[in-house]
Amino acid sequence: MIDSFLRYIANELSLSPNTVEAYRRDLYQWRDYATCSGRYMLEPATTSVSDIRLWISYLSRRGVSQRTIRRKLQALRAFFRYMMKRHGLKSNPAEYVTAPKVPQHLPVYVKPAETEALLASEPDSDDFTAVRDRLIIDMFYSTGIRCSELLELKDCNVDAAKGELKVHGKRNKDRIVPFGEELMQMITLYRSVRDASIPSCSDSFFVRKTGEPLYRRLVYTIVHRAMEGVVHAAKKSPHVLRHSFATDMLNAGADLTSVQQLLGHSSLSSTQIYTHISYRDLKQNYQLAHPRAQKKEDNYGS
């Protein structure tokens, strides 16, 4: 049953491989709990609200974070919805379990001055790895694409002449992301160095020295290494550069809907988190700059 559900969300709902894998882990973990590690048969039709609440309590006692518990409950809700739709289940017990509240943390992003420092130096134009790694940093910050989207970029979908990327995003949705002159030049340089020295083994835009595509851990290592010692953000990852793209776009006057489309968010609410960052910075600047913002020492009656 779980495996058929996973095929359903992958093939019919077109959820990302990462989401499918997370749901697989969550549901297998629930199955092991519900069946005492296989001693009993899994019977979704007899699962009660109390059963699920006991599982949530069990996870909490084991120190599982509230955010992770919310995701596991979401996976269980989706599974029971599938069972109702395809296997005649009468109700969804997971819908009646309240998910734990998760404190909302603002996205980590890079300060503009640190972004300038990160992109200040020019790579050796004869060094394939240096050119590629710099272009990766440029592309994350200039376009706001996700790591998975960068890894899936095909050479034919990067149009330096038009200044456009065709990005294959979540749920198999494609979008066009524009970019500027500086990134155009870096793409042209990268292609010339790559085509002159690297064997053509794939249709991927970004490749290793062997000509094979990049992989996620390597991209994370490249980004972390580039940001180390330059950026003082708590995290140093591709997603931090995506957050920086969105924050700087809004701070420079871009409208929220445009940023939503560029990021590939299905809901405007996902993009609105960046307005909180912009407001926080605005408030801090006000507190620092306005002569009446700081509380003065009370000299009255002294």
Image: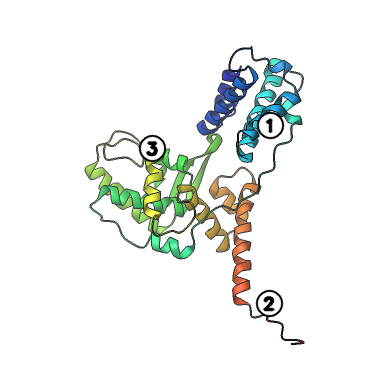
Residue 197 position in % (x across, y down): 22, 43
Callout in the foreground (1, 3) = 1
Dot 2 or dot 3, earlier in sequence: 3
Relative to 99, does residue 272 appear above or below in the rendering?
below
Q: Rate crowding at label 3 as few (under 14), some (14 to 19) or many (20 or more) other CA atoms within 10 Å.
A: some
Q: Secondary structure at mark 3?
A: loop
Q: Quadrant of residue 19?
A: top right
Q: Secondary structure at mark 2?
A: loop
Which residue is identified by label 3? 215
How far apart, in angstroms, are the residues tagged by discs 2 and 1?
47 Å
The amino acid marked with disc number 2 is Lys
Please say whether residue 262 is visible from this viewpoint: yes
- Is the C-beta separation of discs 2 and 1 under 8 Å? no
Which residue is identified by label 2? 295
Which residue is identified by label 1? 57
Callout in the foreground (2, 3) = 2
How far apart, in angstroms, are the residues tagged by discs 2 and 3?
52 Å
Residue 32 position in % (x across, y down): 59, 20
How far apart, in angstroms, are the residues tagged by discs 1 and 3?
37 Å
Pick the residue in front: 202 or 73.
73
Dividing the image into 4 quarters, which one contains the N terminus? top right
